[in-house]
Image (cartoon, grey):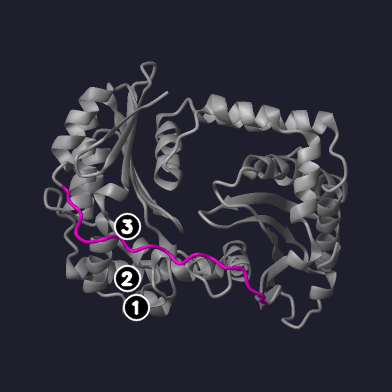
Amino acid sequence: MYQKTTLDNGLRLITSTMPHTRSVCITIFIGTGSRYEAETEAGVSHFIEHLLFKGSNKWPTAREISGAIEGVGGIINGGTDKELTVYWCKVAQPHFQLALDVLTDMLLHPRFDPQDIERERHVIIEEINMSKDSPAQRVNMLIDELLWPGHPLGRDIAGSKESVAAITKDTMLNYLQGQYLPDDTVVAIAGNIEHQEMVTAVSQAIGSWTNQQPRLGYSPYKPKKARRLQIETKDSEQAHLCLALPGLPLLHPKRFNLDLLNVILGEGMSSRLFVEIRDKLGLVYSIHSYVEHFLDTGSVTIYAGVEPKNLETVIKAILEQLDKLKEQIPESELSKAKELSKGHLILRMEDSRNVAGWLGGQEILTKRILSPDQVISIIDAITAEELKQLAQELIVSSELRLAVVGPVASDTPLEKLLKL
């Protein structure tokens, strides 16, 4: 499915040739994110990601960068997560060289113009304000604080208004030198391309990039006792809740079991949460669950938006569905969940951006790449008994956390409900 070459500077290039496509997607993964930040510089990864789009040597303004790519019908974007930062560009195949030039010039020669820094500082503070004004986003931030208290994983990726206001140009340049390093970077390219041509092109564009200094690591997460409930009172039509449990790290041997358990619980309109709480009880419009896997920890989270008077009823109904996962899972339900998981994976692999993301994301985080067929084999081998055992291990009363945002008094005694 892919070929891999490590350049002399340590940068890893991974390609997947998709001859049936007419596009090419270049994705650059940097092995750093918000969990690598000190508290005083919280949000610096995200701030840097924004600024790289504001101008480079060859394309000095944001308009010139976007215009170069949009002028050939392409798409360019980026994103910051807790453990990685990504920059990507997708274009029609004849415009590959332009896309590579723009991305690599942004990465190696960002301008960091003082006026751009101040403008973008205000933009990011408005982004933080917007997130706080959205109860659905805000409750997801609060549940992270409960899952990883006092740790960078529990912080908002964008940082706080106070930390963003304090970040200087020197802060960003120092962070870049210590975290943006070629031997912790993966370039993944998928589309109508040939591997050796990509090796030559990428070597010319970025092969001279060298490490500035030794890379700084991250703080491992060590579980500790902390509060289990956080309520933020807000004037809104709905109460938004996240109910969560600690999950499994990225390389845990049972991580795919947990992913499959999550499909049964709350992924899609035929999941237990959707069928029981929306379709049968009619108590919610939106309800789903999701799993996160980090390098040394993880989580399972259920989100729902509900009329405030029904909040306790919905929490009890969710807990009932969690408890039922510890009972036997019917083979028919297991088979459906497997087919949904495999189907979603296969459909994703038809798009060059998803293929590049699949390859580069695994390589940057785990240094190993499983093919879709390997993952499908793992999924097929999972048994109902294994899922039942995992549910019994993870779904325990003492580990439940609950965050609520909405017209709910901060002293509402919801913690008494957190038992199975």
Looking at the picture, tell me which residue is in the foreground, 45 or 7: 7
> Label 2, label 1: how many angstroms apart (C-alpha)?
7 Å
Q: Which residue is mark 2?
A: 121
- SS of the residue at dot 1? helix
Residue 267: in sight, yes or no? no
Task: Point out which mark residue 418 bears.
Answer: none
Please name the amino acid that badge 1 sits on. Ala
> Label 3, label 1: how many angstroms apart (C-alpha)?
16 Å
Closest to the camera, between mark 3 and mark 2, is 3
Position of residue 55 relative to residue 413, above or below, is: above
**Farthest residue in the top direction?**
20
Please name the amino acid that badge 2 sits on. Arg
In which quarter of the view is residue 264 placed?
top right
User: Upstream in the sequence, badge 2 or badge 1?
Assistant: 2
Q: Is residue 348 left or right of residue 142?
A: left
Do labels 2 and 1 touch, CB within 8 Å?
Answer: yes
Residue 370 belongs to magenta span: no
Q: Which residue is mark 1?
A: 165
- SS of the residue at dot 2? helix
What are the residue bounds of the magenta stretch? 209-226
User: Upstream in the sequence, badge 3 or badge 1?
Assistant: 3
Q: Residues within 10 Å of mark 3 (few under 14, many from 20)?
A: some
Q: Which residue is mark 3?
A: 49
What percent of the width, then of the height, locates residue 156? 49, 67
Name the residue: 23% across, 23% down: 196
Do labels 3 and 1 touch, CB within 8 Å?
Answer: no
What percent of the width, then of the height, locates residue 250? 55, 48
User: Upstream in the sequence, badge 3 or badge 2?
Assistant: 3
Position of residue 363 relative to residue 220, above or below, is: above
**Magenta segment, principal secondary structure?**
loop
> Looking at the rendering, in which quadrant would you find the C terminus?
bottom right
Name the residue: 31% across, 50% down: 184
